[in-house]
Structure formats: C-alpha cells, structure tokens
Image (cartoon, helix red, strand yellow):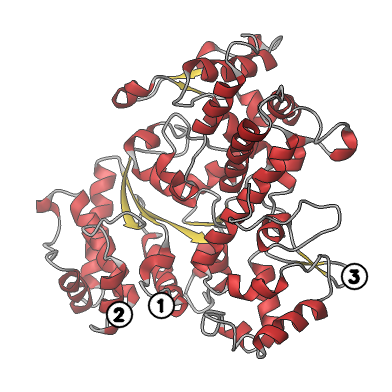
Amino acid sequence: MTSSAVPLTEFRRDLMDALPADVAQENEETSAAQLYVPWSHGKALRLESSLVIGARGVGKSVWSQALQDPERYKVLPRNLFPYPLQVSPGFGTAPKRAHYPPPETFEALLSQHNHPAYAIWQAVLCRALAAAMPQDSHQNIPIARWQDTVAWVVAGQGESVAALIEQADKWFQECNRGFLLVFDALDRVSSTGRWQIVDQAIRDLLRVVLQLKASRRLHAKVFLRTDQYERGNFAHIPDISKLQATRVELIWSRIDLHGLLWQRLTNAPSSTSTRDRFRAWCQDELAGQRSLFQADLFRDPLPTSTASQGERWLLPRVLQQDDQRQRALFEKLAGPWMGKDRRRGVPYLWIVNHLADSQGQTSPRSFLAAIRQAAEDSLHRHGDHPLALHHESLKRGVQAASGIRINELAEDHPWIKALMGPLQGLSVPCTSDQIESRWQAQFGEIPGQVPDLPGRLPERLSKQGITGVMDYLEQLGLITLMRDGRINMPDLYRVGFRLGRRGGIKPALRSSQAT
C-alpha cells in the first residue's frame, strides 16, 4: 500500500481517532480488538497472583475490567487459566450495588454500625459466592441491605463464612470451573478520601484474600496503586508473606508501549484504509520472514457477539518482541531524528524517555495521550510536514501528557498542586535548600501549613517535617535524589509544574496562554 493511499490530513485524524481522547475513560474505551497483553503482564493475570501493584495509568483497571467483561475476557491468552472462570466484581468504579457497597454505605457500616472492614469484605465474598451457585446448594444469606448481610457475617462468628467457602469450593470443583473475585479502585471505599479508612480496608481485604488461599477453585485478585501498597502496614497480618511472595508489579517496557500503540492502530475503529495501511506497514516489516508465521497469527477472529467490529488483527509476535523492528515502524510515523540530525535524539526512544517518572517507568496512558496530542498538533501546526508526527509536536505531546498526569495525581493527592506551586520557575537539578526556602516562604511550617496535606501523609512521614515530604514525593516518583545530593524531577512532572531545565522541554504554558 503506498504512502499516498490516504491523504495526510485524514491520516492524522484517523491516528487521533485510534487513541483515547479522554484518558480518564481509557479503560472503558479499550475494545476487545485493541486489547494488548504484554508478555510480562500475563503473570499478573494468572490466578496465583492475587496482588497486582502499579502506578496510575499502567492498566490496573483495564485488566480488572478485561477479566470481568465477556468480550475482552475471550481474547486473553488461552493458557492463562487452567479452567473456565466465573468472574465477579468485589469492588471497582462501576456502580454495582448488588456486588459491593458504595463508598457512603461502606463508611456508614464502619462508623455508624461499628462493623470492621474485615466483616464487610466477608459479606461481599459471601454474596458473590451465593450468587454464583444454585440457590439450593448453600445457606440463605440476607441480601436486602448490606447492613443485614454484614450482621449475618458477624453473628456467625466466622463459622457461616467458612462453611459457605467450603460449599462453594466443592461445587466449583464438581463443575470443573473456578471463581475469581476482582478488587480495584480501593481508594474509593472512602467517600471523603481519608487514607486511614482506605488503608484499614486494604489490610482487612488482604486477610479475606488469604482466607481463600486454602481453597482449590476460589480466587481473588486485588489491584493496588504502588503508593497504597508501600504505605500499607501489613506486617501484623498472619501469613501475609504468602501474598507478598506472589505479588506482581505492572511495568511497561519501551517495546511493550510501542506494541500497544500498533495493536491500537491496526485495530482502529475509524478509517478502514488507514487501518489497512498500518497493517501493511507491519506486514512489510516482516518481509522475508513470512514463512515463520501461519496466517492465523495475523488474524484472530473476535467472538460472534462483536462481529460488528470486524476481525481482531493480532500484532505478529516478532513485532511484539523485536526492538529494532518497532523502531523502524515508528520511523514511518515520526522519522529517524528529533530534528535535522542524530544529535537531537531518536523519536522512538525520546518519547518514552521523556514520559518516564523518577523510577524510569512510563505509563501507557501517558504514552498514548502524548502520541494523540502530537498527531493533533501536527495536523494544526505542521500541515505540510511529510510525516504524520512532527518532532516539535512530540514535545507538545509530552507537555499535554504532563498536564494530564498532574491532574490525575491531584485527584489522589489534592495537596500536590499547592505544594508544587511555589517551585514554578525553579530550574532542576537544584539543591534541597532551594526547594525548602521557597516552601517556607510560602507556607512557613511544613507540612502543617500546606493546604490538604496534614493528615494525608502517612503517619511515619508526617512526623519528619520537610524530610518526610521529600521522601513521599520520591516514593510517588516525582523527584529523585542525585549522587551529588541535588534534587531532580523527570519531565513528566517538571513540564506540567512549570519548572525549568537547561536545554530541556519548555514548561507547559497555562491553558490561557496556549496557542
């Protein structure tokens, strides 16, 4: 297929349509055809991995919903599960009141009715198991109100729950099936965002997950943000090492991110001609190696219920694993250099590196947002550029992704914008004294005078003043301590918080200044 098959303007618009416009809803928008499972994430989906850890935007909710959605579940690798699964939500973002109590009810059960979070999670488990089995195969559980279900759990003093677990495990064995309860978005168990409630709820949930470890066909999977896991005090939970030993951290390598991009582009719901062009590029990259593949590796039919979306085009395995072939593909979009020559950098490497946090991790949400913004910017600013993505547009893509990332961070940590505001215009790397002097000039006492920060820091860090705040920022991936003692900040946050760096991407303009 020739490069002139699709007009460049239409091509860029199709590229934008293939990527999520609203990154906050990316997990809902990921169709079965566009779902991409990096090899390293297969372990996170397996049943023995009950605890899955990851930062914002790495795909926790995507995997949580893929396990629960029949269409997306069917396109997961078939070797992940040893038997058919019945999957039920234990907690999440969707308003499924029959499956788990909403935040207001959860807090009321804790405070007004004085029930422990452990009993609430047991009630969630019992309702899910009862709904999964025939009514005549288990005890009758009151389900009119969550208060009634939790009271039933408490009155049974553990015996009723244990008996139901045993009955359910036996029933699923006889059916040669398994049961999986999935927990996600646990920060929302508190409608007021109180981390003390969230942390206690997570600790008690892990106790319930451990309770299921003794069964053969009953499983649970908990998706936790990295900061929630690192903040948690799990040392006093008996046998917690059994969960910690099998925990999996969701990490996206550079080639995983680019593989995700091409899975999205080659299964885009927009222009058929553009989608076919992307597929032709992938096939051309494999020229001379086609004998290594069977035709069915290129086309993977979707379930009949999604036939209206067409077939799922599966990215060939070589392109999922070969860094150089992925680089050659991205050159078709953005060229070989970030400017006139190699001194400016390579787009394939540059875009991922400049979206990494202080731990060197780049999230797929930031990556896709940056590519989409780069396509939009190229459309409006560089219409005569011969490639889809102009190198200056990639820089603006990083600016946009930085702003999105900071807004997401502020949802979880409302104090972050107030704390980082006084640092605008400061260039990094810098000394800790430079940061501290700006904070003290603005707030005085740290963290006590920072809006929304007192009470939101982990207790251990809140007693350490500025040092505790610095440690928490480092834990969140916002800053890193260099060997010479100076503080650095990755572009992912630096640009959006409007700090400078000599020779780096310019800080993002305020929305009113952007053109």
Amino acid type shown at disc 3: Asp
Write the residue at 60% across / 14% down.
Answer: 280
Q: Give the mark, 1 or 3, whose residue is nearer the N terminus.
A: 1
Give the label, 3 or 2, closer to the camera.
Answer: 3
Label 3 Cα crowd, 10 Å radius (few <14 / some 14-19 / many 20+)? few
Which quadrant would residue 247 be assigned to in this image? bottom right
Q: Please state which of residues 376 and 317 is positioned toward the viewer in this rendering.
A: 376
Q: CA distance from mark 2 to mark 1?
A: 9 Å
Are the residues flagged by discs 2 and 1 in contact, CB closer than 8 Å?
yes
Q: Position of residue 321 (x, y in %)?
A: 67, 30
Please tell me whether residue 514 is drawn above or below residue 334 in the rendered image: below
- Could you tell me which residue is drawn at 49 percent across and 70 percent down? 239
Q: How many marks?
A: 3
**SS at badge 3:** loop
Q: Residue at x 46, y 24 (%)?
A: 270
Q: Amino acid at mark 1?
A: Ile
In which image quadrant can residue 419 be found?
bottom right
- Where is mark 2, residue-wise? 110
Per the image, label 2 sits on a secondary structure element best described as helix
Q: Nearer the viewer, residue 22 or 144?
A: 22
Q: Which residue is mark 3?
A: 484
Could you say which is closer to the camera, residue 449 or residue 378?
A: 378
Q: Position of residue 141 (x, y in %)?
A: 14, 64
- Mark sitting earlier along the chain (3/2): 2
Residue 458, given in percent of the width and then of the height, sits at: 56, 80
Say which residue label 1 marks: 197
Q: Is residue 421 left or right of residue 328?
A: left
Depth check, mark 1 against mark 3: the one in front is 3
